[in-house]
Amino acid sequence: MMIQTRLGAVLLSCAMGVLLFVAGVEGASAQAEQAAQEQSKPEYSKGFLKSAGKVQKDVQAGEWPAVLEGIAKFEALDELTPDDQRVILSWKLTALQATGDRERFTATIEEFLASGLAGPEQIGPMHQQLAAWYNGKKDTAKTLHHFQKFVDATPDATAAEYETLGRLYLQADDNQNGAKYLTRAVDASAAAGEQPKEFWFQLLDKVYVDGNEPAKRLANLESLVKRYPKREYYTRILSLYTAATQDDRIVMMSVYRLVLADTGLATVGEYLSCADTALVLGSPGEAQRALERGMADGIVPDAGTNQQSLQEAKTAVARDRRDLPRDSQAAIGNPNTPGEVHAKIGLGFFSIGDPARSVESIRRGLAKGGVKRPDDANMLLGAALVELGRLAEAQAAFAAAAAAAGPGSYMTRVADLWTAYAERKSAPPAVE
């Protein structure tokens, strides 16, 4: 793993500090009467000031052997002040960087940090540089130690830097901290208006599988599929939802509808389960469409009991096409018709492929009141509106479904996935 560093900023800071040192020496007499400035001025020893001008000129001229020779003489002096040492270490870093002496350069950074003389703006990048050095030496423990110090000292750490720290923890078999910093990478990237990397979610998925943490795994997969909708991710989500909801058919049907609308299902078992769930809930048209889609995708075998199930679904759809208009008019004409009946008729119209009349019936039922599962009715309403391309209305319906289901419910989570899907559909196409 390559570790990119910010040390250029540190060396520039060191160089600027050296230049300010010279200006301070040359202008000291002119500032002697300014008490406030006197108090804030660096304190240099006489022994240091005696030869500092010569070394500084060598620094400015790029005479690095002479600079290092002068530094060696300074290091032999007694009673150097902290300000003396800070300038000497800055010169030394600049010279060793220029001469390419990586061993001594790195040792000097460690010396600078150990001295406590590094400025706040230098500490983080210096630790980052040490992490890069030890990473090259394949010293995992020291790499991780210094990169953690870098992140701790860097309020504006980037998503890529959080990723690096997370992956270093994973390499050290510390999955808890690995997940912590990969999650920070996701959050930092999203906060910056960027698309978090798909790879981060994949790493987190493995962490949660290895740690047997299904709740965290599901939340991560939901975040992943919102940004990178793929059949394989939906397959994992379907499996987790099935286990978590104890195969709640109403919740699962809402998920199946979403996956069919978005990417399509991935396995024969998913298509057959979707068809079975739709039939049980009274939506043979959705069962028919699922089986036909699976067969068209080459996933569901076009033979045997599958063909029998498809024909049964088609027969039920034909019956509903015949009866639904009459049932709908009868329900509308009777002021005592419960809202639940209108919602069921709305499901029937969705089943036979008439989303416009489905929307009308469901809204009629919700307005009338008495719908047993307003969360389910609003989810179906949103799905029908998505089919009609009325995406803003669909998002409002999904919000109503979530409100009816309540915080933390699985139906609310599915509504959130539907909302993300509607947002993707309504977003302008990406410019390549």
Image: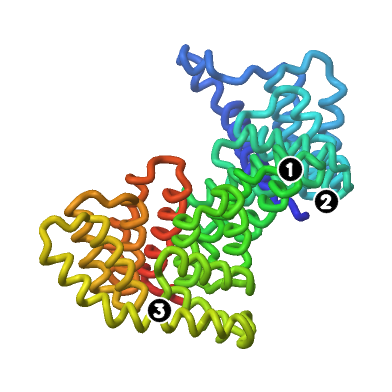
Residue at numbered disc 2: 100
Q: How many numbered discs sit on the rendered protein?
A: 3
Residue at position x 72%, y 49% from top?
209
Q: Secondary structure at mark 3?
A: helix
Instruction: In this rendered view, identify the residue nearer to me: 253 or 199.
Output: 253
Q: Secondary structure at mark 2?
A: loop
Q: Position of residue 222 (x, y in %)?
A: 54, 54
Q: Position of residue 112 (x, y in %)?
A: 76, 29
| Residue 346 image-quadrant placement | bottom left
Q: Residues within 10 Å of mark 1 (few under 14, many from 20)?
A: few
Quick check: 34 left or right of 162?
left
Marking on residue 211: 1
Instruction: In this rendered view, identify the residue nearer to me: 17 or 241.
Output: 241
Identified by mark 3, the residue type is Ala
First along the sequence among labels 2 and 3 = 2
Residue at numbered disc 3: 316
Residue at position x 50%, y 76% from top?
290
- Looking at the picture, does residue 14 appear above or below residue 390? above
Instruction: In this rendered view, identify the residue nearer to me: 209 or 95.
Output: 209
Instruction: In this rendered view, identify the residue nearer to me: 143 or 426.
Output: 426
Q: Residues within 10 Å of mark 3 (few under 14, many from 20)?
A: some
Identified by mark 2, the residue type is Gly
